[in-house]
Image (cartoon, helix red, strand yellow):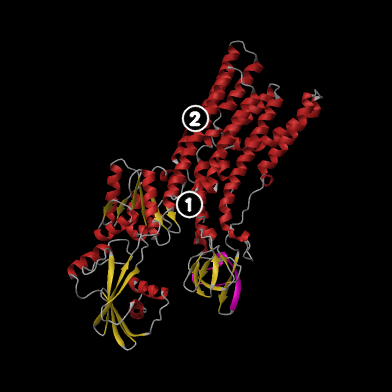
Amino acid sequence: MSLHVFLYGAGVSSTLDSPPVPTLDASARTAPRRRTRFLALPEARWALLATATFLSALPLHFADAPGWTYGPLYAIAYLAGGWEPALEGLRALRGKTLDVDLLMIVAALGAAAIGQVLDGALLIVIFATSGALEALATARTADSVRGLLDLAPATATRVTADGEESVRVNRLSVGDELLIRPGERIGADGRVLDGTSEADQATITGEPLPVLKTPGDEVFAGTLNGTGALRVRVERDPADSVIARIVTLVEEASRTKAPTQLFIEKIEQRYAVGVVAATLTVFAVPLAFGADLTGALLRAMTFMIVASPCAVVLATMPPLLSAIATAGRHGVLVKSALAMERLGEIDTAALDKTGTLTEGAPEVTAVCPATGSGLDEDALLALAAAAEHPSEHPLARAIVVAARARDLRLAPARDFTAKPGHGVTATVDGRFVTVGRPDSGLDAEADTDAEAEADTDAGTGTGTRMDRDTDVEGGTVVRVERDGALVGTLVLADRPRADAAETAAGLTALTGTSPVLLTGDNPRAAAQVATATGITDVRASLLPEDKVTAVRELQRAGRKVLFVGDGVNDAPALAAAHAGVAMGRAGSDLALETADAVVVRDELAAIPAVVRLSRAARRLVVQNLLVAGTFITVLVLWDLLGHLPLPLGVAGHEGSTVLVGLNGLRLLRESAWRRPDGGRPRAL
């Protein structure tokens, strides 16, 4: 079976057409599995017909029945099992290429021409069965990708000024308001506007228990709503949802070829021509020395079969495509077979800080009421949040979020003003409140320098300023005043992700060297994150071009660098690295376009997992090439130096082809995805 048929014989649909799931039961917790049945494939039906007629003819042949009783059955077997590969081979020949399928058909017809009708029919039957099994394996690969789309419903209920309407999911737009009834699947990525419910997100985030959803919470397409009704605003075009992006990228990846595959295809034509020339030699030389015609032709036909490179052709792409599909199910979109192969080659990791190792957004880490202010922590935080509530600044949003997390009541603010770089003022409960940068106890010049250093990072707007009167490193100190008197300070920081240390350790174990931290942030903030994650090589205050220089220095030293980042300023380093991975949730468009792979849900631990998966795919490629090469070598030598029966040669050749194809599909199993901590995989 040709590589082209194996890769492209089963298309992957990109339409969202599965019905909504009406009830919340155990079966709904996993993605519906649409497994292609064997007899649904035309290759399988033709192979079954060829096999049935061959088996019907076999007892008649051995019973020495008249030829007319079993001859037509053999003819049907030849036609049923051989017409499609013969047609494909002729089309390839018309395009001036020699297809290995055509070699098999010629060998079968050659056997029939010298009276070995049974052997030729056996070759056709085994060849057709092999092709059917390969088609089934391809279809099952496509099933695993198509199954992701089954998570999203075909229709959604859109709320309009005139009421409600049922629309196709692919007609939804950003900003549309959806009504999600109990037991329905959510049709698009969005945010809850109204209502309270629990969403089963096991198929998206891997969380085993339903997650409470209240106004302001994010919801994902394909997750299952619980017992409450929700109103959701669509925040991402359905065609750009996580599930749809996975399918699109896997489809695109299946149309790319890895360097190993390109090399195999480059030599395939020359090898096929060489096989034809060698076959003619194997036939002509014994004939010239007095061998009988039938014996010489039979040996030549056997040689053509066992020397054909079918298994070699199938050695590379099935493992890589299986790895791409498995990574996609777990939230890592690898853009091509080339990218998947390169991920397994890396021996050094370089990581950005803000938005990559850290959350990329500030949060309140300390609330410090001033002595004599009369305020406790909750009162101070509520006062600051009330004044900051109208502001859109990232620090203001973090303060308000912290107050809401404590269920604090926020008094209304009047006369609100904001002064960039200084803070905000407002009247809260009749008192004049100021929240902003310290006016005393801080060296203004040093503060400005540190803030400028922080702002060179990924453009998050979360500048890091150091208050020399505090014992806080890498945090932003916010001063809260009431009627001109200091009542306390808040400390905000961009915390490392929960799995940052685990990821750094996983990459260290894989590469044998600790990752390098490359950041535009100031040295103190970088050192704090490095200490928390176990990274020892820290390079701070880097401009975008400095990150590229650092990556190239490592590569000049003979290292193959994996760079992980998220910001616009990371795109040059992503492009310069041997392999680049972008964080998908907050990553800039430029970073997402430049990277070889995207971590959709920002789960850092998925990075060493996908590197490990890529290495597993590369090992399977090597295994397949060794198996294919061993079979070809042994069978060819057996035929040239001894007497290899044609049926045994056929079984060996086709058996190795099937073995190689199925071995490559092992990475579709759930167990192929392993996290650094050895824990249960988080399925997407």
- Could you say which quadrant of the image residue 380 lies in? bottom left
Residue 463 x, y percent position in the rendering: 28, 66
Q: Is residue 114 left or right of residue 552?
A: right
Q: Which residue is mark 1?
A: 679
379 vs 168, nearest the viewer: 379
Badge 1 amino acid: Gly
Number of other residues with Cα within 10 Å of mark 1, as a class: few under 14, some 14 to 19, many 20 or more: few
Tag 2 residue: 270
Q: In this rendering, is residue 514 above or below 240?
A: above
The Cα atoms of the two marked residues, 1 and 2, are separated by: 47 Å
Q: Check disc 1 and report its element: helix, strand or loop.
A: loop
Q: Nearer the viewer, residue 64 or 292?
A: 64
Q: Inspect the magenta stretch and tell me whether residue 245 lies in it.
A: no
| Residue 170 belongs to the span the image colors magenta | yes
Query: What span is colored magenta in the figure?
Result: 163-179
Query: Relative to 233, is 588 above or below?
Result: above
Crowd class of label 2 (few under 14; some 14 to 19; many from 20; radius 10 Å): few
Query: x and y percent of residue 234 in the render?
Result: 50, 69
Residue 12 image offset from top left, x and y in percent:
57, 51
The kind of secondary structure element at disc 2 is helix
Residue 187 - label: none
Left or right of 347 on screen, residue 174: right
Along the viewing direction, whichever of 284 and 193 lies nearer the viewer: 193
Q: Please determine whether, in this image, residue 632 is positioned above or below residue 385.
A: above
- Residue drawn at the location 64% of the way across and 40% of the way down: 132
Q: Amino acid at mark 2?
A: Arg
- In primary-sequence order, the first of circles 1 and 2 is 2
Task: Look at discs 1 and 2 and give the one toward the viewer.
Answer: 1
Residue 461 visible:
no
Q: Residue at x 51, y 51 (%)?
A: 250
Question: In this orientation, does residue 52 appear?
Answer: yes
